[in-house]
Amino acid sequence: MDYQGVLEEIARDVAPLIGSGEPAAYIPALADVDPKRFGMAVADLDGNVYGVGDWRTPFSAQSITKVFTLALVLAHGGDSVWEHVGREPSGNPFNSLVQLEYENGIPRNPFINAGALVVTDRLQTWTGDASSELLEFLRRESGNPELAFNAEVAGSESEHGDRNAALAHFMASYGNIANPVPALLDHYFWQCSIETSCADLALAARFLARHGLLADGSRLLTRSEAKQVNAVMLTCGTYDAAGEFAYRVGLPGKSGVGGGIVAVVPGQCTLCVWSPGLDERGNSVAGVAALDRFTTLTGLSVF
Amino acid sequence: MDYQGVLEEIARDVAPLIGSGEPAAYIPALADVDPKRFGMAVADLDGNVYGVGDWRTPFSAQSITKVFTLALVLAHGGDSVWEHVGREPSGNPFNSLVQLEYENGIPRNPFINAGALVVTDRLQTWTGDASSELLEFLRRESGNPELAFNAEVAGSESEHGDRNAALAHFMASYGNIANPVPALLDHYFWQCSIETSCADLALAARFLARHGLLADGSRLLTRSEAKQVNAVMLTCGTYDAAGEFAYRVGLPGKSGVGGGIVAVVPGQCTLCVWSPGLDERGNSVAGVAALDRFTTLTGLSVF
Amino acid sequence: MDYQGVLEEIARDVAPLIGSGEPAAYIPALADVDPKRFGMAVADLDGNVYGVGDWRTPFSAQSITKVFTLALVLAHGGDSVWEHVGREPSGNPFNSLVQLEYENGIPRNPFINAGALVVTDRLQTWTGDASSELLEFLRRESGNPELAFNAEVAGSESEHGDRNAALAHFMASYGNIANPVPALLDHYFWQCSIETSCADLALAARFLARHGLLADGSRLLTRSEAKQVNAVMLTCGTYDAAGEFAYRVGLPGKSGVGGGIVAVVPGQCTLCVWSPGLDERGNSVAGVAALDRFTTLTGLSVF
Amino acid sequence: MDYQGVLEEIARDVAPLIGSGEPAAYIPALADVDPKRFGMAVADLDGNVYGVGDWRTPFSAQSITKVFTLALVLAHGGDSVWEHVGREPSGNPFNSLVQLEYENGIPRNPFINAGALVVTDRLQTWTGDASSELLEFLRRESGNPELAFNAEVAGSESEHGDRNAALAHFMASYGNIANPVPALLDHYFWQCSIETSCADLALAARFLARHGLLADGSRLLTRSEAKQVNAVMLTCGTYDAAGEFAYRVGLPGKSGVGGGIVAVVPGQCTLCVWSPGLDERGNSVAGVAALDRFTTLTGLSVF
């Protein structure tokens, strides 16, 4: 498939949308990003990468890292993670806390903040250093040894971290957090702060299109586990807009408030798009439009 | 593909599960069904049907009809239905009412009861006779002119219909129901009561695998609309277990408390399985297992 | 005590507030009332009545009738009503439905709409004609045989009654409503429509200040039951502002969206104030201020 | 009034209930208390104290201290505290977190944990040492200089403090906590740990019966403020059983999970009862019964 041609057509098509929406404003490091940036990359199964726009510019990966943390936990502990977190969409953001209470401290899925804290807690328990483990994995799979934490972002997240602290303590009150809350929060915020480009993330996510195989051909996840992570991405990957995303794009995807979105065409390729302007549900306006366009142009939706 | 061979293998594999779970008990007509029944059918794009077990035995379609009602409303009114109902998973059953209140009478999706009432209200407004419209459609697409309402089931539903009446009046208080509530409830209960076999439903759902084309080659939905219905089925089709269903089965599916489940492999085939024993979330135990087995044996998951 | 003097001082003090707030707007019969009306009456234990302003003008009693319906049910069935309804404040209006669901169809207290529907259902079961029973009681205790239902108001309530219908059906789904929902709603709306003056209500409520004794000296409630009704009024009588009302006024009270409020000084007197402008929680602005002033001037708060 | 005689009659009457219910079990220091203890004291306006049973035995005051903290904050900052906390009953415990979210981090009232954390935060801001301020106040008003914190209890509370930490961080995320969360929690847990007897608490609460005047005749609260604290106690003082407590006892009261309850007869006397066995809503079984008996025997209910 002529990915390069498709990407260039998409870039032209979504140009009017670039700058729409609002960059995340809760920390200065995100609020100050130029809202006019746009990049998109596709990686095929063999590791060829195609790109357009700012596809090699690093941005704050934020919640996109939750996919990789989940995969690492599955690789270390298999199904046991599902004793600590569910696999169901979360309804809406308003419910996050009441659902935690109703369900005795078990978050609905690994991609809401509460769930990602639990998954990070698992990775911390399995490895002793959850954030380094994640960084090493991303460097290895992207082939980019320069990937790094952004200390300013991690610090800002921590300063504005009362809500995540509340979630972590609340789950700890149900016995669903094993590590000390302050250390767990640190690892969580460091993970969110990692800076990557579209190219880096499209490459790093390839194991999801390769049914669990890493870049070097070794296996991270079983075929079944890879399929399952894709299913969780499709049903839970874009905050309270998972249904809308499935409806419009029809691919497993995971977004972050930095404006990035990773998507997977199982057996075919992985994509990453980035543009900082977010819609009211926290997903990149131009990013969702670009993925929508991609599935329309290529017919590569899963539906 | 050797669908017949696959079905027979599945029937052997899930035999130990047949009779597990509990048939729906809220109305006698459902509670009295023999829990040992099991049938499964596959229809390919050309209308060839393969089956195993009780695949020609009629059962109560119940909520499976919600897929067809939605498709008919899209065919009549296009996108306008989405002003009255959302496309997001509903979180959990406990929240149904509070979410309705929080979201000003707009149900989360067309497949929870509140949403199906709104969709039926739309069909009633477009056609003047929502339940007959649905019955005619199912007869035509299944090629089975003997499909019929079950008056006893419809009557029982009505007698136990206080909760649906509550939902309808509640949405009416927000102006989101156009027809008189008692008439709307009648149409809703008649729809649920339709009796169909696995073969009937696999055939009737074919337009979802055929990108919107009906049995006679005419178009019910655009390619994009068909894809969208599949997306809503995948994210919202199995009550509060949509995430779990996507995780295990990985196909768009819609279940009913009669023990049936319809599933779609876009571009390939449609399936219907039936066994009355339900798990605690209202989905057929043997049915989900059979679909899980199907995707494992054939590799036909969307992920 | 010089009630007449106190009332006149209050009328002067609250004059600037008369017309503040907004009359209830959900039905025309209430929306059209002159917002400049203000009346207040005090009845002592012997049935002497003092008044100021529009104290003899009939207005729509609305939810104030809930106190009398509760008293009649206690008189007929004693404690058994508490198997159907609780005695706890309801938190806030947003929660009404989720609380009903959480508590299996048992409303929090007799003064929220759900609770009043249950109490009316009880009275209907005990008497066969709940609304007439209430009207007769009010006529007898007020000594005013001209008290009557307002058919226009009852009709309007019914037309805008979807939310109450939703509550009634929802409780019926839990088995907590014994009578047919449509008939129950009729009685409920007729009760709300009764027109009374401040003088009428102050007189009719006297049994609450007289420890259960009616105007003719016969006993409606035991001393303990009368005390208990007062307690429920104090903790639950003014919608979501019961805490605020206790804080400011410090008397058992029950308000209605017609702009009336009845209050009780146990062992001393009863009061009724009326002014149609409501605050955002549905209580008369000038009415609450007048009662606040009354307790300040007389020292007659219960605290 | 013959308080001594009344107390002795009560002690006989409630003897069969002593030992009913279960002592609080979440920390060892409370779980290990002998469930057969019972004491009750009455203090009149002049400081004469009458008692029965274990009325001079210290027990863990726990949430009863919330009344005194509130009074101290009102004394320091007047009405400003109500910008940070409401005055409405909280509905039910299930709602605590969702209500906080719904109401943007403003707790419903000063006597639920979230509200008491806010009030302690205020006292900390006004005084720089909230827990010492409270201890000094209780020593002075009880005339018992030996009152002290219990370090073991405070430590245990802290170890089991994840839920309170969650509440505090959650409110901090809304800007409704001014002090660092860990320090605030320490002061909060130290306050809860103070050990007092029935005699101590009955004496210390006297300003609430004396319309705001302290033991030495100086004024802590205005007459109006004292009345208001009593109103908040009546509507919110006994967890989710405030309606029930008002219904049965009819006095302003505040309970603690140590098994104590303080109650006020405005203008007359204060009471404190203690027995460790709690009902399912966290109030002393024998304690509530004893207060119920007190109002029945003396007629001193506010209703």
Image (spheres, coloured by chain):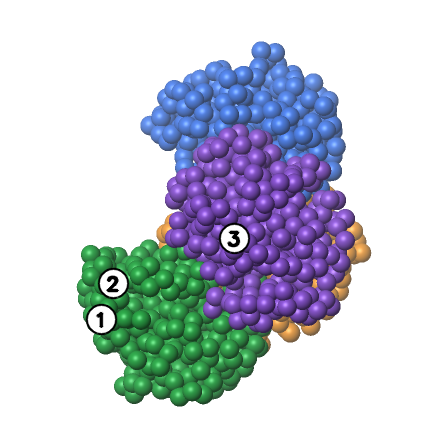
Chain colours: A purple, B green, C orange, D blue
- In the image, D182: left or right of B185? right
Q: Residue at x 64, y 47 (%)?
A: A196
Point out which mark residue B10 bears. Answer: 2
Q: Amino acid at mark 2?
A: Ile
- In the image, A86: left or right of D64? left
Residue highlighted by disc 3: A206
Whether residue A176 is visible here, answered yes or no, is yes
| Badge 3 and badge 1 in a common chain | no
| Viewer-proximal residue among B105 and C257 | B105
When the figure is inspected, residue B182 is found, relative to residue D100, above or below; the finding is: below
When the figure is inspected, residue B160 is found, relative to residue A122, above or below; the finding is: below
Image marks 1 and 2: residues in contact by CB distance under 8 Å: yes
Mark 3–mark 1 Cα distance, whole angstroms, equals 39 Å
Which quadrant of the rendered structure holds the N terminus of chain B? bottom left
| Viewer-proximal residue among D198 and D50 | D198
> In which quarter of the view is residue C260 placed?
bottom right
Return the chain for callout 3.
A
Residue highlighted by disc 1: B52
> In which quarter of the view is residue C1 placed?
top right
Q: Residue at x 57, y 31 (%)?
A: A183
Point out which mark residue A274 bears. Answer: none
When the figure is inspected, residue D48 is found, relative to residue B277, above or below; the finding is: above
How busy is the neighbourhood of tag 1: few (under 14 within 10 Å), some, or many (20 plus)? many
Whether residue B132 is visible here, answered yes or no, is no
Q: Residue at x 62, y 16 (%)?
A: D139
Q: Amino acid at mark 3?
A: Arg
- In the image, C13: left or right of B250? right
Q: Residue at x 28, y 71 (%)?
A: B3
Residue C208 position, x and y percent, is: 52, 50
